């Protein structure tokens, strides 16, 4: 039911900036055809006008899915308390032990990520956690650690890494489907609803 790409809705490009007026023109036109809007990134919770933007979407009768990295738990909680969210998808970069390195932020405050994950699990909204799995960044020990951390989560997806077109110097690669299945098997005792996504 939610639009999953950066263009928000059919007919809006994800390659060029689109004005808010144009977004709402399309959303008004699509009422009764679309049921929800996915607000994705970059990181949407960095935008100070996000609550007002989501309020306008909700006033049109749409459901709202938030894609977030979880680094601003106070923003996520605020949006929830204002009734502006219907679904939360939170990226889990890797295990807590390696989070700062994988995120490329030596000073990353892991407690912020952990607070968001705990809130997402307890707030009562439908949600998912997901990790884009990269051969050069993830190992079996990471998934055992994630499993212990997010034990009992409603849904967790292992997403296969996909190389973007036009990368000047490719340094990352994907695991095979069989290797991803082995990681999934490690996670199942902790998170029974673990699935693969983006795998042929």
Image (cartoon, rainbow, N blue to C red):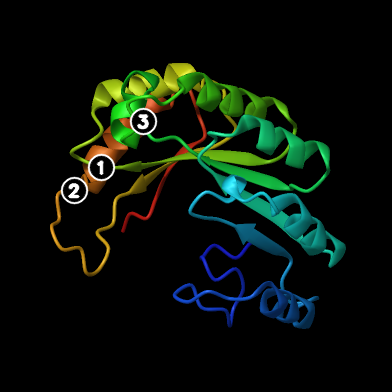
Q: Tell me if label 1 and label 3 are in contact, CB under 8 Å.
A: no
The residue wearing badge 2 is 172
Q: CA distance from mark 3 to mark 2?
A: 15 Å
Disc on the earlier residue, 3 or 2: 3
Q: Tell me if label 2 and label 1 are in contact, CB under 8 Å.
A: yes
Frontmost residue, 69 versus 157: 69
**Is 143 placed left or right of 23 in the picture?**
left
Q: Quadrant of the N terminus?
A: bottom right
Q: Can the viewer see residue 149 in this picture?
A: yes
Q: Tell me if label 3 and label 2 are in contact, CB under 8 Å.
A: no
Please report the residue visible at 15 percent of the width from the left and 63 percent of the height from the top: 168
Q: CA distance from mark 2 to mark 1?
A: 7 Å
Q: Count neighbours of disc 3 (C-alpha within 10 A) and say few if under 14, some if 14 to 19, many if 20 or more.
A: many
Please report the residue visible at 52 percent of the width from the left and 34 percent of the height from the top: 193
Please report the residue visible at 49 percent of the width from the left and 26 percent of the height from the top: 191
In the image, residue 66 lies at what x, y percent?
Answer: 63, 49
The residue wearing badge 3 is 94
Q: Count neighbours of disc 2 (C-alpha within 10 A) and say few if under 14, some if 14 to 19, many if 20 or more.
A: few
């Amino acid at each position: 039911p939610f639009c999953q790409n950066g263009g928000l809705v059919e007919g809006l490009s994800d390659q060029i900036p689109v004005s808010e007026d144009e977004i709402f023109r399309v959303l008004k036109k699509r009422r009764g055809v679309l049921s929800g809007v996915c607000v994705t990134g970059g990181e949407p919770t960095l935008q100070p006008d996000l609550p007002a933007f989501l309020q306008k979407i909700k006033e049109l009768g749409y459901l709202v899915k938030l894609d977030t990295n979880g680094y601003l738990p106070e923003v996520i909680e605020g949006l929830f308390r204002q009734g502006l969210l219907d679904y939360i998808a939170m990226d889990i970069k890797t295990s807590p032990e390696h989070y700062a390195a994988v995120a490329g932020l030596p000073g990353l405050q892991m407690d912020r990520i952990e607070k968001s994950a705990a809130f997402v699990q307890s707030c009562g909204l439908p949600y998912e956690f997901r990790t884009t799995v990269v051969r050069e960044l993830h190992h079996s020990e990471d998934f055992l650690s994630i499993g212990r951390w997010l034990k009992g989560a409603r849904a967790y997806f292992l997403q296969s890494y996909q190389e973007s077109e036009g990368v000047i110097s490719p340094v990352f690669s994907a695991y095979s489907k069989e290797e991803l299945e082995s990681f999934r098997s490690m996670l199942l005792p902790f998170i029974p609803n673990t699935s693969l996504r983006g795998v042929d």
